[in-house]
Amino acid sequence: MTISDAIIPVVFTTLNFKDFLGAVMVRWGINRDKYRVTPGLYAAGKPGQESDVFVTANYKLSFDALRKNLAGVNGWILVLDTKGVNVWCAAGKGTFGTKELVSRIRLVSLDKIVNHKRLILPQLGATGVAAHKVREETGFNVQYGPVRASDIKKFISDGYRADKEMRRVTFGFKDRIKLIPNDFMYGKFYLLGAMAAPFLISGLSGNGVSYRDFSGVGGPAILRVFLAYISGIVITPMFLPYIPGRHFSLKGFFAGALLFIILFLLNFAGNNSIEILSWFFLITAISSFMAMNFTGSTTYTSLSGVKKEMKISVPIQIGFAIIGIILQVIGKFI
């Protein structure tokens, strides 16, 4: 089979409005599990038998990040079936791995498409691929490119060499901001659950139960819970490097404590000392728990580290929540 005999889709290296809209939607968790491209071989520009082969995942954000950075480059894009998961996560799960790469090379008959034996893989996929096994089974040599697709052209122009900055995994403000919408939507059921108890308790009084005056009874309770949620899932990731503590749960606790102080100074933390104290426990527990959920989106933690943190933090968070609820009930009858 020659290149002319093969039916290989050609992709644009310029993203259009549909691509942009799809990216925005998936950032908000909309259609996330279906945001993928068909695995296989694609052509960027007008590649030939000596053109480079770039390997990526079939998660469309990963695919788009690669192709838009191949503008002006004639190359092949080999897309692995990672079940719609990005390169780094798929490498950890094994779908961006040796077996899939070997299988995909054979399925597209890559040895008949190109004359060389070079494959350029993203560095973040290294944990899932055994380069020596790929070479043994297919004859292709794996070379790891830079961490970020935006450095690909420089990587090529530098003789396929990555400098220290290209190898460095960063998690800056812009990276963290991009992840917040999806995590915000992912935790929406936690938010609804957290709102329920304080709202129900807010209607209690020595005279019975009443929810007639929403703004004066349930409204403030729901707003405080929502602000605690924002503290953990938005504020903590935004200012992550500047908040004291190593564990995310501790960072979330400090962010929640700061929020409580602000609410207290604004006379919005409750009507009596018991209720005010209850909101300290509730706000810090919610903020701490939601901040801890961001560990799945960051480069700062490992699986073992997350498990260890949860083992310590979750019981404390539950304890704080229970104390807060008990104090809430007591405060309603003072």
Image (spheres, helix red, strand yellow):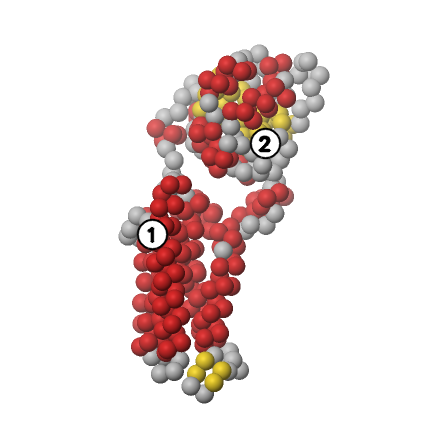
Q: Residue furthest top?
A: 115
Report the disc number at residue 312: 1
Q: Secondary structure at mark 2?
A: loop
Residue plotted at (44% across, 32% down):
124
Q: Nearer the viewer, mark 2 or mark 1?
A: 1
Provide residue 303's location: percent of width, then percent of height.
40, 41
Q: Is residue 290 above or below residue 268?
A: above
Front-most of residues 158 and 261: 261
Residue plotted at (48% across, 73% down):
199
Q: Is residue 181 left or right of residue 162?
A: right
Disc 2 from disc 1: Cα separation: 37 Å
Q: Is residue 69 above or below residue 196?
A: above
Residue plotted at (50% across, 32% down):
94
Residue type beneath disc 1: Ile
Is residue 40 at all visible to an observer of this figure?
yes
Q: Is residue 291 left or right of residue 19?
A: left
Q: Quadrant of the N terminus?
A: top right
Q: Residue furthest bottom?
A: 207
Q: Earlier in the sequence, mark 2 or mark 1?
A: 2
Residue 327, by quadrant, is bottom left
Residue plotted at (49% across, 59% down):
190
Front-most of residues 32 and 332: 332
Residue 166, by quadrant, is top left
The residue singled out by tag 2 in the image is 81
Q: Quadrant of the C terminus?
A: bottom left
Provide residue 138's location: percent of width, then percent of height.
55, 15
Provide residue 200's location: percent of width, then percent of height.
48, 74
Report the disc number at residue 173: none
Disc 1 packing (10 Å; few <14; some 14–19; many ≥20): few
Residue type beneath disc 2: Asp
Q: Is residue 120 above or below residue 88?
A: above
